[in-house]
Structures are given as C-alpha cells and as structure tokens.
Amino acid sequence: MLENSTIARPYASAVFELAQETGQAEEWSATLELLGVLASDKNMRQLMTNPKISRQQLQDLVFEVCGDGLSGLGRNLVKILVQAGRLQYAPSIKNQYEQMRAAAEGRVEVEVVAAYALDDQQQAGIAETISERLGKQVNISTSVDESLIGGAVIRAGDSIIDASLRGRLTELRNELAR
C-alpha cells in the first residue's frame, strides 16, 4: 500500500505550482487547511468510506460544509480528490504544500519536542542555531514529552536531531547488543 505522503505529493505539487503561478499562496494555505480539517473529522471519515454514499453526494456535502471557504479552483480540487477517492489525503496534501511553500519562501518549520517546557531564551537559541545551520528563517514550535527523560528531539524538514536521553539510551542498548 502506498504511503500517505507518496499519494499526496502529486496533488501538493500541482497546488503549489498553481499557487506560484497565480500568486495565491496564502489563499491555497487556507483552502488546504479547511479541507484538511474537514477530512480529519471522524464523522466525515466515516462518510468518505461509506459505500452507500456516492462520490457526487460526498462532493456536494463538502461544498455545502465549506460554503464560501472554497474558491472556484478550490472546488475543482475537491472534485478531483473526491472523484479519485483521495479526499482523505487532504491533511497530507496540506502538510506537503506548506513544506514546499516554506522552502520557496526561505523558511523552515522546526518542531522541538523536549522533556520539559522550554523558556523563550532556550527556544531562541535553538532557532538561531538551526537558522545559521540551514541558512533559512526558522519558525519553531515546541511540545513536551516527559518520556524523553532529558534533552530534546528536533525535527527540521527531513532532518531529525535526537538529543534526548531516551535516544542516547536506545543507541547505547543497540551498541551493547552487537
């Protein structure tokens, strides 16, 4: 079975190209956010997989729920996704689109998962270090995962830096198992 990102990539690329051509990057972000939230809804997911609901009915339902939140091109995207049976991939399409947009704008989204809450100074230090390393503007988001024991895991695009105590203990266990 194909992975979500593999299926979503062509759609995200097409939307990104269209957004670049029309200068509507922000509008497409909003459209994809709306579709991503809609496709993530538990009730909507049940409808998307219900064989008694025709694709036309599903499309009409999406149009009704989204209302004026969809432009003409947004409605075309919905038609394509529904007819191809790919509406459930809207969250992945949105994520990939945002990564492409950030890269084109010289930004990178960085997620820091730490064993404890980081203060503003620590966040700024991490952002500055990654910005220097990647040569891009950094947007940082943080969360806490106490199971890391200490340290942090930093995700920037496809790169992952595991500087957590849990990660080091796992590494040590693997070395000892050889």
Image (tube, rainbow, N blue to C red):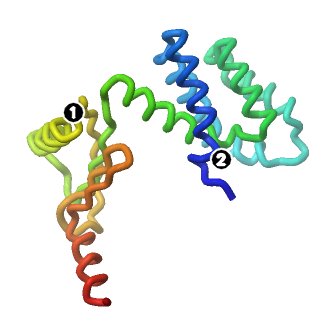
Residue visible at 45% across and 31% down in the picture = 100
Along the line of sight, the residue nearer the viewer: 139 or 107: 107
The kind of secondary structure element at disc 1 is: loop
For the residues carrying marks 2 and 1, which lies nearer the camera in this image? 1
Q: Quadrant of residue 60?
A: top right
Along the line of sight, the residue nearer the viewer: 70 or 154: 154
**For mark 2, what is the residue?**
42
Whether residues under marks 2 and 1 lie with C-beta atoms below 8 angstroms apart, the answer is no
**For mark 1, what is the residue?**
135
Q: Residues within 10 Å of mark 2 (few under 14, many from 20)?
A: few
Mark toward the start of the polypeptide (2 vs 1): 2
Report the amino acid beneath label 2. Lys
User: Residue 65, position in %: x, y?
Assistant: 70, 25
Along the line of sight, the residue nearer the viewer: 10 or 59: 10
Residue visible at 78% across and 37% down in the picture = 84
User: Residue 6, position in %: x, y?
Assistant: 60, 47
Q: Is residue 77 left or right of residue 4?
A: right
Q: Is residue 173 left or right of residue 17?
A: left
User: Residue 110, position in %: x, y?
Assistant: 30, 42
Image quarter hosting the N terminus: bottom right
User: Residue 148, position in %: x, y?
Assistant: 26, 66
Which of the labelled discs sits on residue 33, or is there none? none
Residue visible at 51% across and 13% down in the picture = 24
